[in-house]
Image: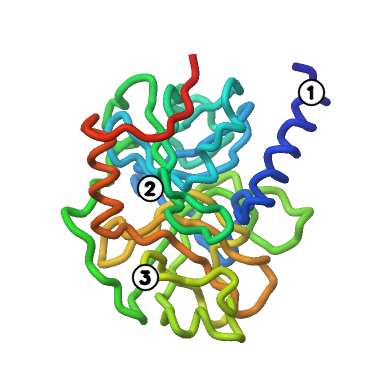
Amino acid sequence: MSKMLQVAFIITIINTLANQGCYCVEIIGGQNVKPGSGSFMASIQIEKTHVCGGTLIHAQWVLTSANCATSYFQGKDFRVVLGTLSLKEEKTMKIFKVIKAIQHPNYDKETERNNLALLKLHQAAKQGKSVKVLKLPKSAKKVKYGAKCKTLGWGQTTDDDNDDPSDILQKIHLTVIKQETCNSKSYYNHQPVITDDMICAGDKEGRAKMCQGDAGGPLICLRTKLTGIACFEKSCDTVHKPGIYTRLSDRYLKWIKGIIKGKLSNFTVEQN
């Protein structure tokens, strides 16, 4: 594929994700992740370009958003990169082919409900200092409003559309916002409706925020517990449009564990 065709292809991917409500990675007000942290983070890439985040929850499985596992990517150079904080340091990258992508069967891109997916790697990742599994919680716990959380991702560090993505993995600290507040007229105004299976989290000053989706990345609350998956956020410079995360409810945990154990069969996207 020529460079011009590669550029056109990547632009098409970005536009496709945008039309689904999730844009490619951008974190505002973040900090560089220190070495030894974020070892569970996955960079989901198309044609060697980062398009989504993910979390290594099992040696051979990555949890991400449903937008990052559509059949649109079938047959393309679809891969997962682990073990690096910098997307330019190829020597530190552990590269895996994605052999199966499984969306939640009830995912609805209009309402953003059931927005989660699993990616199966071609082989189990060897764990060490730079690659570690972030285990799923045994059961879901309700996250109270005001709780402190964090999310991680690679991407722009300003809301300037011409800014280049960050090379280094970023993290931001967030506060959980009341569901009623997030659904109010001055926030999302029920477009879409923020449900009990979602978490609304952001920074009231609007500085620190997962911007334009950072689709698929983790939301970590209750100290070190994986609590949610980055789903979407409306426009980086829009006030009162905090990030929305799919909450890892008990029914989602049951679905995830069933897929990994091979006890469930759902819609899959497979590559040869």
Q: Closer to the camera, 234 or 87?
A: 234
Answer whether labels 3 and 1 touch (C-beta < 8 Å). Answer: no
- Amino acid carrying label 1: it is Lys
Image quarter of the N terminus? top right
Q: In the image, what residue occupies the spot 58% across and 64% down?
A: 233
Question: Cα distance, mark 3 to mark 1?
Answer: 44 Å
Answer above or below: position of 245 versus 74: below
Q: Closer to the camera, 91 or 42?
A: 42
Q: Which residue is mark 1?
A: 3
Answer whether labels 2 and 3 touch (C-beta < 8 Å). Answer: no
Q: Secondary structure at mark 2?
A: loop
- Amino acid carrying label 2: it is Gly
Of badges 2 and 3, nearer the viewer stands: 3
Sequence order check: which comes first, mark 1 or mark 2? 1
Question: Cα distance, mark 2 to mark 3?
Answer: 27 Å
**In this picture, residue 239 sits left or right of residue 67:** right
Question: Dot 1, how many residues are within 10 Å of its Cα: few (below 14), some (14-19), or many (20+)?
Answer: few
Residue that extends furthest to the top in the rendered view of this protein: 272
Q: In the image, what residue occupies the spot 61% across and 86% down?
A: 186
Q: Which residue is mark 3?
A: 196
Q: In the image, what residue occupies the spot 41% across and 44% down?
A: 104
Q: In the image, what residue occupies the spot 31% across and 65% down?
A: 221
Question: Dot 2, how many residues are within 10 Å of its Cα: few (below 14), some (14-19), or many (20+)?
Answer: many
**Picture coordinates of residue 99, whole percent (x, y):** 43, 22
- Amino acid carrying label 3: it is Asp
Sequence order check: which comes first, mark 2 or mark 3? 2
Q: In this view of the protein, can residue 33 be seen by the observer?
A: no
Q: In this view of the protein, can residue 13 be seen by the observer?
A: yes
Residue that extends furthest to the left in the rendered view of this protein: 138
Residue 38's label in the rendered image is 2
